Amino acid sequence: MKAAIIKNQNGQIEIATVSKPKPRQGELLIKNEGSPINPADLNNILRGYKDALKTKEFLILGFEGVGTVTEVGDSSLSSYLNKTVVFASTNGSYCEYSITNPQYCIIVDQSSLNENDWPTYANPITSMCMLDIARKSGTKCIVQTGANSACAKMLIKICKLNNIETINIVRNKDQVQHLLDIGGTYVIDQTDKEFKTIFSNLMKKSNPQVCFECIAGDFGGLIFNLMPKKSTMYLYGSLSLQPLGRISPVEMIYGEKDIRHFINLPYLQSLGDKGRRNLLDEALQYYKTCFGSQVSKFVSLEEINEGIKYYQENMSKGKVIVRPKF
């Protein structure tokens, strides 16, 4: 099969012919319809491959996709055959066929494969895990940075349905109204000269106990410092490509605040089999109303470098989907 791979420490992406995987017991083989380019993919392309190549001859890129189950590893999984699923894969998804475990896939409607409502796995499941964290914390309000992202928009919608307010921080005033229109309780432009005052007043008014932070750098540190007492910041990205900075020891110690990492798949695993299945089953009900992703561009495997460049320059316009040609 064809796959987008990296095999050298120079990080060059190649389209190569590799062996088609064979599902083992407990696994599914999926014929890919398309895989999105996500920030996590960019991180893997820029840095993560170096560690992977210490133990592998080559790395197939991509972490998630949508496709049709064409083969199963054992008869207990026969109900998945010929079904359309969104999935996560640790074996790559920018390829014609992917392997995954049923616990990391959701059966979806084939009719949703269109540019206005493209189904994905990572962003919906990330937002569901965030919702789970918020509900377990007992907070009535959350804060999120990078709020114009696809994942953040999904979180806005499902939080509204679950009666949790959202304080959403964006980097462009033109993004404010759209997030209010889809259900954001408050939307703040971080470039506003009054941002710190506006944000501080909202902290007093709404007392959010959870923040999902994806920018890092000094701005991430500022948000942490301004969060209310006994709150927790969950760091799940670094769009600034900078270390989380200028964190006040006084705020952390005497404000009794915490900073924790967040990654969706390890969080799912921490829920146990029953908790994970319950969360995935709940996610299914939101796919038509909250989880469709706007697509800005489709590219073939052969056009992946063009697609990556386009996505880096146009992240706010929607998903770039890598589609194999069979």
Image: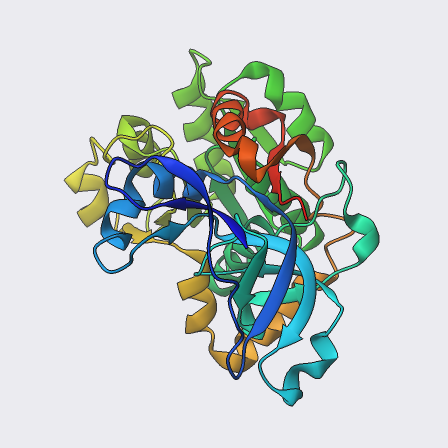
Q: Which residue is at a point 61% across and 15% down the rendered structure image?
A: 174
Q: Nearer the viewer, residue 177 or 75?
A: 75
What color scheme is it?
rainbow
Q: Which residue is at a point 55% across and 55% down the rendered structure image?
A: 1
- Residue 127 appears at what percent x and percent y? 56, 52
The relative height of residue 207 versus residue 124 in the rendered view (above or below) is above
Q: Residue furthest left?
A: 249
Q: Which residue is at a point 29% across and 56% down the rendered structure image?
A: 57
- Residue 310 appears at what percent x and percent y? 53, 23
Indicate left or right for 284 with 312 as reference.
right
Indicate left or right for 73 with 213 as reference.
right
Q: Kindly indicate the quadrant of the structure image that contains residue 153.
A: top right
Q: Which residue lies furthest to the right in this view?
A: 111
How many numbered discs, if any? 0
Q: Which residue lies furthest to the bottom in this view?
A: 75
The relative height of residue 184 versus residue 90 in the rendered view (above or below) is above
- Residue 70 appears at what percent x and percent y? 68, 69
The relative height of residue 240 versus residue 70 in the rendered view (above or below) is above
Q: Which of 221 and 42 is in front in this view?
A: 42
Q: Can residue 147 be seen in this view?
A: no
Q: Which residue is at a point 24% across and 60% down the rendered structure image?
A: 55
The relative height of residue 279 versus residue 195 in the rendered view (above or below) is below
Q: Can residue 304 be seen in this view?
A: yes
- Residue 256 appears at what percent x and percent y? 25, 52
Q: Which of 82 and 115 is in front in this view?
A: 82
Q: Nearer the viewer, residue 270 or 181?
A: 270
